[in-house]
Image: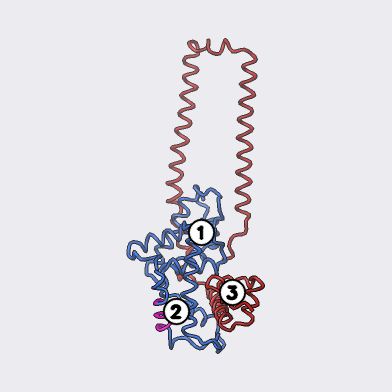
Amino acid sequence: MNQVHLNEEQFQDYAITGIADPGVMQHVAGCARCQMQIKAYQTLYSYIREAETPTLDFKTDDLIPERLPAINKEDSEEAWYLYGFLFGTVALLVAGLIGFWGTIRWVFMDITPFAIIIGLLLLSGILMTQSLEMYRNYQKKLTALNRKEIAT
Amino acid sequence: MDGDRHAAALLVRRTEKLVAQIVFKMLGNHPDRKDLTQDIYLKTFRYLPRFRFQCKLSTWVAQISYTTCLDHLQKYRPELTTISAGEELLLSNTCAQEIAGDIPDASQLLSIKERSVILEKLSTTLPPVYRTLITLFHKEELSVEEIRDITGLPVGTVKNYLFRARKVLKESLLNHYSKEDL
């Protein structure tokens, strides 16, 4: 029989998994000291597993949602600022394009059909990449949401 | 969340037991429990748009719970995670002395409630972080990686704290119970 006692880490692992090297298992089978240590850990683990889950002595779902509108208002204000900025930028660009069309139209006059095709292809490529990225993100979110939450 | 109270209530219902575990293990019967729990969920809903689906939603809520409790504790108690190797023996002995006489013999058939009381007493002297890690790993059956995500501690540290906490609790058990009782 292997005469070397198990160390603390081995006690803990053995008590969790019940698996060890054949030599270790043979030693445990014949060693009262190691058996007692493993039994102590197993008792401890069973106490933890079976311990009652504490419950909050107040109703959380009454406590929280009543304060949600205030939070959402802050968030939606932030979103409106962002949308406002984006809309303003686009509007300024379009207005500039229309207002100064006479001055800047030469930029577009010299563009060859080949350059237009290349431009369109590039634009399509970018749009397709973005769409694929959006689809991947959507799938990722669905996977995360469908994943089984901790049974609480 | 867009004011969807139903979804908010569902999220609270799904996670409140895990949140309760963390709050109780970190704070015990602290009078600020209610305020902190409210704070945890308000943070959750406020930062929900920033949730990037990198982990389970419950893990993310647990992460907020842990950091909120830790911030709260650090205001009052600086010694949250540290016990030296020398202190481990002292802790287990102190713990055994404190609980001696309160605990029925293991040879008697113990109800789950009695076992909970015993465990609670055994773990009273452990630092809050140790108690929380033990509960998350053994009771909630989270992996070490999930605990790392929640606590922000490196995997090695999580394993080390778990090892030391188990050792202290085991010594406390052995100090109280004889071999036959186990």
B162 lies left or right of A17: left
- List x then y, in percent, for residue A119: 61, 21
The residue labelled by disc 3 is A15
For the residues labelled 1 and 3, the Cα–Cα distance comes to 21 Å
Co-location on one chain, circles 2 and 3:
no
Chain bearing tag 3 is A
Q: Residue at left 56%, top 13%?
A: A108
Tell me: residue B161, above or below residue A104.
Answer: below
The residue labelled by disc 2 is B121
Q: Which chain is blue?
A: B
The residue labelled by disc 1 is B155
Any part of residue A91 in sight: yes
Check if mark 2's residue and mark 1's residue have beta carbons within 8 Å. Answer: no
Magenta segment's dominant SS is helix
For the residues labelled 2 and 3, the Cα–Cα distance comes to 22 Å
- Magenta region includes residue A15: no
Any part of residue A65 in sight: no
- List x then y, in percent, for residue B178: 51, 87
Chain bearing tag 2 is B
Q: Residue at left 64%, top 75%?
A: A25
- Looking at the image, which is closer to me, B92 or A10? A10
Tell me: residue B55, above or below residue B176.
Answer: above
Earlier sequence position, callout 2 versus callout 1: 2
Q: Which chain is red?
A: A
- What span is colored magenta in the figure? B90-98
Residue type at the position of mark 3: Ala
Residue type at the position of mark 1: Val
- Looking at the image, which is closer to me, A75 or A45? A45
